[in-house]
Image (tube, rainbow, N blue to C red):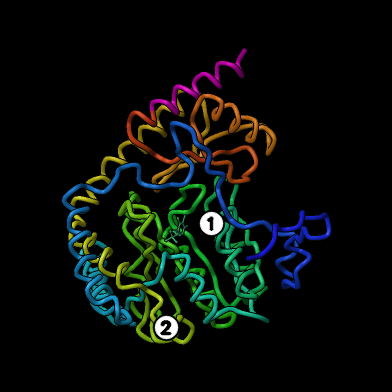
Amino acid sequence: MEGPREQVTENDIIRIDDLPIRDELKGKSPYGAPQLDVPVQLNTNENPYPLPEPLVARIAERVAEAARGLNRYPDRDAVELRTELAAYLTRTGGHRVGVENVWAANGSNEVLQQLLQTFGGPGRTAIGFEPSYSMHALIARGTGTGWISGPRNDDFTIDVEAAVQAIAENAPDVVFVTSPNNPTGTAVEADTVLALYEAAQAAKPSMVVVDEAYVEFSHRESLLPLLEGRPHLVVSRTMSKAFGAAGLRLGYLAAHPAVVDAVQLVRLPYHLSAVTQATALAALEHTDTLLGYVEQLKAERDRLVTELRAIGYEVTESDANFVQFGRFDGAEGSHEAWRKILDRGVLVRDNGVPGWLRVTAGTPEENDAFLDAVRELMKEQER
Ligand SMILES: *Cc1c(COP(=O)(O)O)cnc(C)c1O
């Protein structure tokens, strides 16, 4: 038996930066939205509806089946799952996609990480047009890829001319385009993607990654058909948002078969567990039910836009399951508003876009609670 532990002294406290970590990680904080325990949580763009019971039962069935084989490694290439994802994309994306065009991983964040491990890395760079999804820059950092912050217009659309110029000047190895964009909700026109793709090919050639995490909520069609004849284009997708399965951790991409072969150079062996594959396959059997919720959420999103404007807020046009609203007085103003909305029991997201906040479309009751809170806030400001 060991004796009692000695008291921890000041000298024993080791901070992250005291460890021999990589220079680019020093002084940094991990990604994460503050998750506070309040009644209405509209801060992480999740689907507010739990999975329907018949699907829960089907997941239990398929997972039980998978459990009987857990002494073996899973299908390394996730062929059955990729086949079903390809069928889903073909059915909904306006473009025929086969199993050879699809790759899957633990969330689209892992897909993006694999893409940067393959096409980025030390001595290479990636560009994104900000404000956009902050994980693109963080995954770049984690993979040793240099990050270039590209411009946007004041209305948060991509300034095509400036973007093309930034690509020509920097010749990045990877170009990120998020459509609909997070946190602004802005959809990107196909013509814009084509212009960026042309510029990227002329400058390098480089890979163009279209992050379509929210595309099921969009007023527009998917950009998937642009894959035709463009081997350097990748479309990434996720089951975290429209499918209401953020806890599952399943993301995927569609691209030329050569891209699917290339990312396999960096994937860890057996990266996608048999349990994950079985659960995702069960969810894909219930696509129609799940996408039914999407229609409700789109209607709620549109209601949020209309009501926020009626109250007197500015709203950025949204094609996603969230809405960016303002304007507040700079970064301090948006943070103060965030706090006051929180005081009323509603958690929204302060994405660090000065003057703006982002709210996720929740259930009608949650959205009502949010609208009541911001109505009061507006009255208070008018006083
Ligand atoms: C939420 C989100 C993702 C999803 O990440 P997962 O790892 O699939 O949960 C990807 N891209 C954007 C822009 C997002 O907002």
For marks 2 and 1, the one nearer the N-term is 1
**Dividing the picture into quarters, in which one does residue 141 lie?**
bottom right
Residue at the farthest right position: 11
Vertical arrangement, residue 188 with respect to residue 45, above or below: below
Residue behind mark 1: 133
Vertical arrangement, residue 320 with respect to residue 259, above or below: above
- Which image quadrant shows ligand 1? bottom left
Give residue 246's position: percent from left, percent from top.
Answer: 38, 55
The local crowd at label 1, few if under 14, some if 14 to 19, many if 20 or more residues have their Cα within 10 Å, is some
Give residue 19's position: percent from left, percent from top.
Answer: 75, 69
**Dividing the picture into quarters, in which one does residue 116 lie?**
bottom right
Q: What secondary structure is marked by label 2?
A: loop
What's the magenta region?
368-383
Q: For the residues marked 2 and 1, what is the alpha-carbon distance in whole angstroms?
A: 28 Å
Give residue 195's position: percent from left, percent from top.
Answer: 49, 68
Residue behind mark 2: 269
Between circles 2 and 1, the one closer to the viewer is: 2
Q: Residue at x 58, y 38 (%)?
A: 356
Q: Residue at x 26, y 44 (%)?
A: 295
**Amino acid of disc 2:** Pro
Picture quarter with the C terminus: top right
The local crowd at label 2, few if under 14, some if 14 to 19, many if 20 or more residues have their Cα within 10 Å, is few
* In the image: residue 8, left or right of residue 341: right
Q: Residue at x 52, y 82 (%)?
A: 118
Cβ of mark 1 under 8 Å from ligand 1: the answer is yes
The answer to whether marks 2 and 1 mark residues whose Cβ atoms lie closer than 8 Å is no
Q: Does the magenta run of residues contain 382?
A: yes
Q: Does the magenta run of residues contain 359?
A: no
Vertical arrangement, residue 212 with respect to residue 46, above or below: below
Q: What secondary structure is marked by label 1?
A: loop
Residue at the farthest front position: 1
**Amino acid of disc 1:** Tyr
